[in-house]
Image: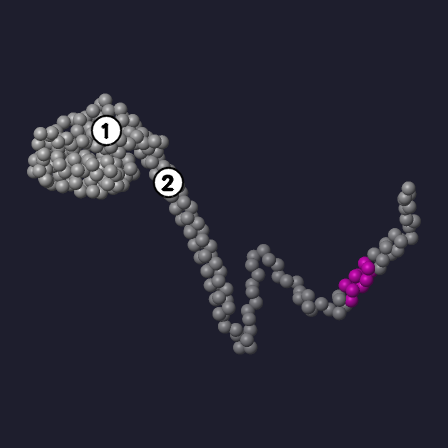
Amino acid sequence: MLMLIHIALLTLLQTAQVTPPAGNPVSEGREGNKLFEAEAYDQAAEAYRSGIRSVEGDGPGQIHSGLLNNLGASLYRQGEFESSAAGFASSVRMAPDATGRARGWYNAGNALVQAQKLEEAVEMYREALLQDPTNTDAKYNYELARRQLEEQQEQQEQDSENQDGENNEEQNGDQENSDGQNQGENEEQSEGQQDQQPNQGDEGSEQPQQPEEGESQPQGDPETLTRAEAQRMLEALQNQEEQLLREVQKLKTRPRRVDKDW
């Protein structure tokens, strides 16, 4: 959305009958205005600073406030938005009337928007409206900056919630990885301990493992079958093979079905 930007540039007039001497704030102001119109903003800022130095002891006044405002405008055009806002705020303190204060607060709000300081910008526009409730530009910018601030805050809250969710997921993942790693380490340690058990060899006999409850004792070692038992197993296998062979022979003698091929 378009942000309405309007920087008020004061024109410091010189009395026609009198030519101000060098170093006069009005002369410096006129020189600064010429440089500003020529887009020589850096040189314009120096001219305004020179004029400000010449009136520093004078206190609030139209010329003092105008020089500070125009310094803020030249800094704004150079992209130095925070310094620009400071210049505009200073012009408010030196402004002799509500019109000058409203202008300074409004311009400070514009500079703070450009500096991405929306909360402070909203406050500046509010101050401008308190000084001049009829300022339509200040009303527009106030509402726009306030909406942008709300959107920014909502986005920040959403980002914070998303970050919290990601952190929780990472913590859960780290915990799972830690549990798995601990389990793996325990298994490896157990296996390692088994591997590290000394091999007794011929120095002693191994103790047989006792069966747990519910398990039956082995009835015999397959490797200790008697010769007679082995013979009976072979005969049974041969009988099964012969029976299977007879079944196959029967299938071969049956007539095969002939299907027509036309």
Mark 2 highlights which residue?
A: 159
Residue at screen point 66% across, 65% down? 220
Name the residue at 56% across, 59% down.
Answer: 212
Q: Position of residue 258 (x, y in %)?
A: 91, 46
Boundaries of the magenta span: 231-241
x, y percent for residue 84? 22, 38
State which quadrant residue 70 falls in: top left
Mark closer to the observer (1, 2): 1
> Would residue 10 be found to the left or right of residue 207 on screen?
left
What SS does tag 1 mark?
Answer: helix
Q: Residues within 10 Å of mark 1 (few under 14, many from 20)?
A: many
Residue shown at 49% from the left, 60% from the top: 187
Viewer-closest of 227 and 7: 7
Q: Extreme top residue here?
A: 134
Q: Is residue 94 visible?
A: no
Residue 58 falls within the magenta-colored stretch: no
| Element under disc 2 | helix
Q: How many marks?
A: 2
- What amino acid is at disc 2? Asp
Q: Say above or below: 186 vs 205.
A: above
| Camera-side residue of 75 and 122 | 75
Classify the position of the N terminus by image quarter.
top left
State the CA–CA distance, disc 1 to disc 2: 29 Å
* Residue receiving disc 1: 126
- Around disc 2, counting alpha carbons within 10 Å, would you say few (fewer than 14), some (14 to 19), or many (20 or more)? few
